Image: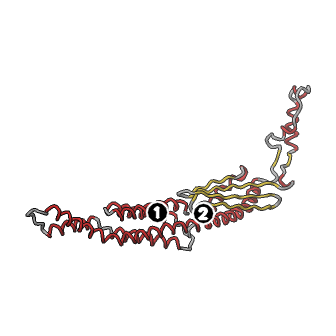
Amino acid sequence: MVRSMTGFGEASAQIDGVHYLVEVRSLNNKYFKATIRLPEVYQALEAEFEAELRRRITRGSVTMTASCTAAGASGAHAVNHEALEHYIEQIRRAPMIADGTVRIDVSGLLLLPGVLQPPVDEGDRLDRARRAMLPLLNKACDGLIAMREREGKSLRDELLTHRSMIADRLTRIAERSPTVVNEYENRLRARIEMMVKGTDVVVNPADLIREIAVYAERSDIAEEISRLSGHIEQFEQLLSESDDRPLGRTLEFLGQEMLREANTIASKSPDAGISRLTVEVKGAIDRIKEQVQNVE
């Protein structure tokens, strides 16, 4: 199945008074590359999330962003009164505080280490986030993959259009190719007759046949036409597959092979008609190579 590498998916849920949001975006990349953006307190979960992304997505530059917001009092930090009183007792000993020159700012004291305690311990917090975010990550990946498949259908239609154009031009090249040698023979005979006209020179038929045979061998493109035909047939078969295996790299390789055969046809055939058709074939192959860069 043809899938684009561009996509977006998101999922959210409110669990135990906390609102969780997960977004997944993907762009083109030759390989798989993941960027995980989590709140600082959940950084320990990054490796697990990346492993899950690798399981669901084969290729592309993928960015996952997750956030969580406490919806009620359950998210509030607790004040460690003993720690706060200890800080105040030490600050009051300072001369500037004792004589009233400087007043104590309670809001600033709350920022001191140990004064505010998280609502749950570190391990429990990570476990809750893991249980909440992993299902959301999979749901977001489902949305991203669905978007990739929709864009993949458009890509497939465009690639098949280019493939049809190549097949049409290749058929015309194959039809034109046998006449090239005949036209060369006629031109060669006419040129020789004009050159020897009015002289006693006699052209050896064997020499003429040998020259035509050399030209025919040098300009023979039947093998290249056959290989290119095989490549575009395989190209169409791959685009018609319905399984989930990634096709991007295989299609890229086929595009390179198609262009190689088209270049050989262009270099071997001196015929102007075939040259014009080959230029159109190469243009379509270049467009295919551009498009398959976005196929997973």
The alpha-carbon separation of the residues under discs 2 and 1 comes to 29 Å
Mark 1, secondary structure of its residue: helix
Drawn side of residue 149 relative to residue 266, left or right: right
User: The N terminus appears in which quarter of the rendering?
Assistant: bottom right
Other residues around mark 1 within 10 Å, as few (<14) / some (14–19) / many (≥20): many
Whole-percent x and y of residue 56? 62, 65
Other residues around mark 2 within 10 Å, as few (<14) / some (14–19) / many (≥20): many
- For label 1, the residue is 284
Mark 2, secondary structure of its residue: loop
Q: Which residue corresponds to the image point at 36% horizontal and 64% vertical from the top-left?
A: 273
Q: Quadrant of residue 23?
A: bottom right
Whole-percent x and y of residue 156? 55, 68
Q: Which residue corresponds to the image point at 68% horizontal and 53% vertical from the top-left?
A: 44
Whole-percent x and y of residue 245? 55, 69
Q: Quadrant of residue 87?
A: top right
Whole-percent x and y of residue 8? 66, 60
179 or 116: nearer the viewer: 179
- For label 2, the residue is 57
Drawn side of residue 222 relative to residue 189, left or right: right
State how many labels appear: 2
228 or 168: nearer the viewer: 168
Marks 2 and 1, the one that precedes in the sequence: 2
Q: Amino acid at mark 1?
A: Ala
Q: Amino acid at mark 2?
A: Ile
Residue sticking out furthest to the left = 200
258 or 64: nearer the viewer: 258
